[in-house]
Amino acid sequence: MAIAMPSFSTRRGRPPSHKPATDYGTPELIARRARGETSEAIDLCLERRLITPAEHWCGLHLRWLHTLRHGAPGVSALALTDGSKTLPRESDEAWQRDREKEYREAIAVLQSRHLIHPIVDICIYDRMPKNLRSFGKVSTSNHKYDFVQKLKMGLGALDSLWNGNI
């Protein structure tokens, strides 16, 4: 008996956000948005053209794989009334196994190149160094440049892995 694979949409990632022309938030929230404090780190990197759209996708894909494997980082609420005390797992075990293998391969590639920390900080835990939040021109002689180079190298390695270039 053949197991039917779930069909997936050809459109991946987050849906485009259609922001209204007028910001109706509080003055404090408007100011935080203007400073880029409400955007995710990986999105800020793409906005500032520190990474390419393909590298951005790789970062989001790694986060998705991490979430499938370990759950979403941060605080979450569970409905403990059913007695399981865990989040429901994916019902297709072969598909889940393949995603976990993909995650392990990605982490192994990043660890072998000593690039795991900047990628995990930015992509999974949304931790951008404070000096990059107000990122201006990239200088070749400072910490910002080194961090961006490591980020690009790590996301490039993932892009190569997932596009069959390794």
Image: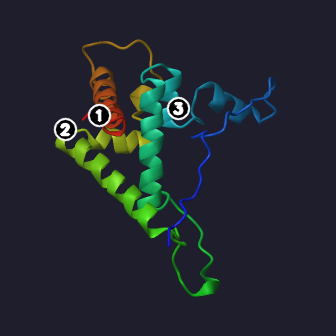
- Please tell me how crowded label 3 is: few (under 14), some (14-19), or many (20+) other residues with Cα within 10 Å: some
- Front-lying residue, 80 or 143: 80
Q: What's the residue type where badge 2 is placed?
A: Arg
- Please tell me how crowded label 2 is: few (under 14), some (14-19), or many (20+) other residues with Cα within 10 Å: few
The answer to which of marks 1 and 3 sits earlier in the sequence is 3
Q: Secondary structure at mark 2?
A: loop
Which one is in front in this view, the residue at disc 1 or the one at disc 3? 1
Q: What's the residue type where badge 3 is placed?
A: Asp
Colour scheme in the image? rainbow
**Residue 147 percent coordinates (x, y):** 30, 28
The quadrant of the picture occupied by the C terminus is top left
**Residue 129 percent coordinates (x, y):** 39, 34
For disc 1, the marked residue is 157
Q: Residue at x 61, y 39 (%)?
A: 11
**Residue 45 percent coordinates (x, y):** 46, 27
The answer to which of marks 3 and 2 sits earlier in the sequence is 3
Residue 113: assigned label: 2
Residue 43: assigned label: 3
| Depicted 101 relative to depicted 146: above or below | below
Which one is in front in this view, the residue at disc 2 or the one at disc 1? 1
**Residue 141 percent coordinates (x, y):** 24, 14
Question: How far apart are the alpha carbons under marks 1 and 3?
Answer: 19 Å
**Residue 125 visible in image:** no
Q: What's the residue type where badge 1 is placed?
A: Ala
Q: Residue at x 51, y 67 (%)?
A: 3
**Residue 119 visible in image:** yes
Q: Secondary structure at mark 3?
A: helix
- Please tell me how crowded label 1 is: few (under 14), some (14-19), or many (20+) other residues with Cα within 10 Å: many
State left or right for residue 130 relative to residue 143. Answer: right
Q: Secondary structure at mark 1?
A: helix
Residue 111: assigned label: none
